[in-house]
Amino acid sequence: METHAKAIAELRERFFRKLDDEGPPDSRGFHSADIARIKNSDDWLKRFLEHHEYNEQEAFNMLWETCTWRRKFGTNDITEDNVRRDYLEDGSIFGYSKDKDGKKLFIIKSKLHVKGVKDFPELQRCIVYWFERLEREGNGNQISIFFDMAEAGLSNTDMELTKYLIGLFKSYYPNFLNYIIIFEMPWVLNAAFKIIKSWLPAKAVPKIKFVNKTTLKDYVNPNDAMKCWGGNSDYTFKFVSEIQTNGDSALNGKLDNKKVHFIENSPLTEQSPTSFGDQINEEQLLSIEPTETITFNKDGNDITGIITLKNITTDKNLSYKIKTTSPEKFRVRPSSGILQPSEQRNVTVLLQPGYNVRGLLQNDRFLVMCLPLKDTNATSQELAVLWKSEKATEMHKLRCHDGTIENNEIQKSHSVLTSAAGNDRNIDAFFSKINHLEKHYSDLRSEMIIIKYILLFSIILTIAMAILVVYILQADIKDLVDQQTCQIPRGI
């Protein structure tokens, strides 16, 4: 135990030593929640060491890379309010119950997922949301992935998604995987799972458990298993929001009273996720469009977004002000001004030269604030004094989204697990051929069924015709016998 405690202390010291010497790889620094975790959580650091069997160099490299990824991906800021709600509610991925070791289950219901239908970067964010939520709910305990493959086919097999999941466990969630439970896998997917096994570390391969309704009880208690798995639970999926306990400082991955630094370096206490876009006072003064996310599109050589502001009062003048978490990245025109009653104005947000759509992350935010104004002739100096002396009456928070088609391709090409493009193309080609074979097989099977019914009908028709012919012949023979009998003379 002393050796482990020493290794944890050394890992912590080494991290902060490098941070002091070299600084973080991201100009914004590591996320404050991750820094606090490294300072205060021995259990989290221990997971990195256990993941690499106490190889301190590899554990340190993973810790540094994990914190770097968490900042770039915006992991700590992901909540159920800023991911695709329809993806959370469709029942294709969700957390439920636990295995026999007491580890929470992350369910992937394969038949509800079709490759290529969902926006992959958004699906990645939903997966990370569930990973973070299950990690919080289990206090850092491991989870088991449960692939429910009942009634699934090749169209439901997404190799890119599976590779992404494996990569999260390998690179960013240390010692987090208990089992990979595969329930009722169709035989046609055997080739696919041979490829998947090759992506796993050697020590993770024994974690794969193929089960059916009979053998599932070896890994999941029947009372914890749904009836569709052969268990006793009547559970039907319905997305339920994460509940914050009184002693917990985090809600859906967001720390309460977390400081978000906007332009002018003025820290503002962030509202809870459910209040995004809501006014502070009861009477709303300012209407903004869009209400949640600014969409950036190409306009010639520029990449711009539009915020439409409207003073929805009929008797008040408003002073508005717009701040951003990334002033070096965006130019807001005009970033402040006065709106007369019922006046509407478009504000242009321009992505500065030297930045591109890859930089449009969930961490880039805008804050639109307003104050009622009595004197419409106030000078800029007087307005500056007013904003310093008074608290904003109303605040709206906006996130960023890239509206160009190219961005999806860029995000995919830079996703953590899609770097091996050549291999993925080969895999896609392989599955495309199998899909064609499956389709041809299905068509052939349909034709065989039709031929079977035609043959059956032909046989029945032939038998019916034979019976009819026999009946007619019997009738003719009877008539002939009767005629011959009538012709015989009675005297003979």
Image (spheres, helix red, strand yellow):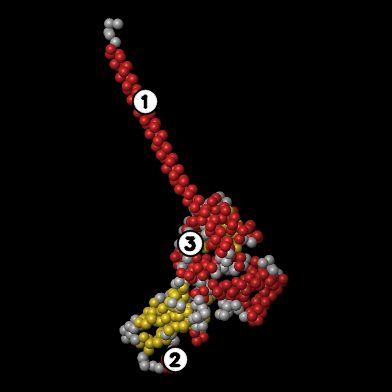
Mark 3–mark 1 distance (CA, rounded to whole Å)? 63 Å
At 62% from the left and 58% from the top, the residue drawn is: 198
Q: Are marks 3 and 2 in contact (CB under 8 Å)?
A: no
Image height of 385 relative to 85, above or below: below
Q: Amino acid at mark 3?
A: Gly
Q: Which mark is residue 116?
A: 3
> Marks 2 and 1: which is nearer the front?
1
Q: Quadrant of residue 489?
A: top left
Across and down, in percent, residue 142 comes to 59, 64
Q: Say few, some or many: other residues with alpha carbon within 10 Å of mark 1 (under 14 / 14 to 19 / 20 or more).
A: few
Residue beneath disc 1: 470
Q: Amino acid at mark 2?
A: Ala
At 35% from the left and 82% from the top, the residue drawn is: 344
Image height of 225 relative to 317, above or below: above
> Marks 3 and 2: which is nearer the front?
3
Residue beneath disc 2: 384
Query: On the rendered image, what quadrant is the C terminus found in?
Result: top left
Q: Say few, some or many: other residues with alpha carbon within 10 Å of mark 3 (under 14 / 14 to 19 / 20 or more).
A: few
